[in-house]
């Protein structure tokens, strides 16, 4: 029995975000022990994301997944459509190759992604930060080389850190940020504000945690032009 499929979906939109067109092709391999698949996300006539590889059906085989995910000028703005709690105004372009292997319950992701023109607003402090960097994915580790964050006035902060996990469970992370006259707070007043205003700071921040535990250590001083109000 030969199984083969060819699917195309035009103009995919999720939560008002336009992704593009999706093309998906799959067929059973010649040895009948795997499905060969190829999925492409096409935007402005270019392949922005391609997933290609095999899904194995052999029960005796430990490795069930062997996929290569290629990012090409991929817009990270789609993350805004997911309404992730605590962050907003996500931006950036991703390029790179990530390989997925292992089984369905314990996938292994390895590869590198370069992020250009990245941006994010942390809602709790209101500050919008921009950056460019490379992210390394290994079996139980996600790492970033030391990189600079910039606030919307061009002040820089040096950041570096690692994230550890066990097949994307039992998370453990550590992020250090060294700031110099950096806009650490930028919140406008509203009816629910516990605090608001702008704060510039110099010093060191450490954000670490595991599972649902979060720890923030601050050793910093405020700089001129800081104006914070507590209603």
Image (spheres, grey):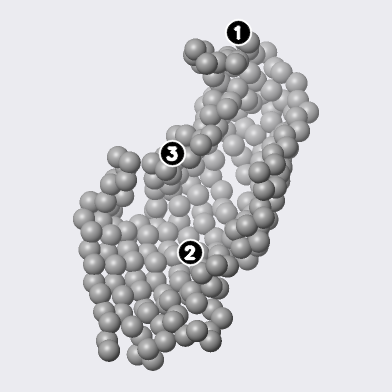
Chain-order first, disc 1 or disc 3:
3
SS of the residue under disc 1: loop
Q: How far apart are marks 1 and 2 (CA)?
A: 49 Å
- The reply to whether residue 190 is visible in this rendering is yes
Q: Position of residue 187 (x, y in %)?
A: 54, 19
Residue at (50, 49) in percent of width and height: 115
Q: Is residue 118 left or right of residue 212?
A: left
Looking at the rendered image, the quarter that the N terminus falls into is bottom left
Residue at (27, 64) in percent of width and height: 23
Q: Position of residue 43 (x, y in %)?
A: 28, 53
Q: Residue 83 carries which label?
A: 3
Q: Residue 97 carries which label?
A: 2
Q: Nearer the viewer, residue 168 or 90?
A: 168
Answer whether labels 2 and 3 touch (C-beta < 8 Å): no
| Location of mark 1 (residue) | 231
Chain-order first, disc 1 or disc 2:
2
SS of the residue under disc 3: loop
Q: How far apart are marks 1 and 3 (CA)?
A: 28 Å
């Amino acid at each position: 029995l030969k199984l083969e499929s060819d699917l195309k979906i035009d103009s995919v939109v999720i939560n008002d975000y336009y992704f593009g067109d999706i093309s998906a092709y799959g067929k059973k391999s010649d040895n009948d022990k795997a499905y060969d698949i190829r999925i492409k996300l096409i935007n402005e006539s270019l392949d922005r994301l391609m997933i290609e590889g095999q899904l194995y059906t052999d029960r005796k085989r430990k490795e069930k997944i062997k996929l290569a995910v290629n990012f090409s000028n991929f817009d990270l703005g789609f993350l805004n459509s997911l309404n992730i709690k605590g962050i907003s105004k996500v931006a950036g372009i991703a390029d790179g190759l990530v390989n997925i292997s292992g089984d369905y319950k314990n996938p292994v992701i390895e590869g590198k992604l370069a992020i250009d023109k990245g941006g994010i607003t942390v809602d709790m402090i209101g500050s919008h930060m921009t950056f460019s960097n490379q992210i390394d994915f290994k079996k139980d580790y996600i790492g970033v080389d030391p990189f600079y964050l910039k606030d919307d006035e061009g002040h820089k902060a040096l950041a570096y850190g690692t994230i550890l996990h066990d097949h994307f469970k039992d998370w453990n992370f550590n992020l250090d940020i060294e700031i110099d006259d950096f806009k650490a707070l930028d919140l406008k007043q509203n009816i629910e504000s516990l605090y608001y205003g702008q704060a510039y700071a110099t010093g060191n921040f450490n954000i670490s945690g595991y599972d649902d535990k979060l720890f923030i250590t601050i050793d910093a001083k405020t700089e001129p032009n800081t104006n914070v109000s507590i209603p």
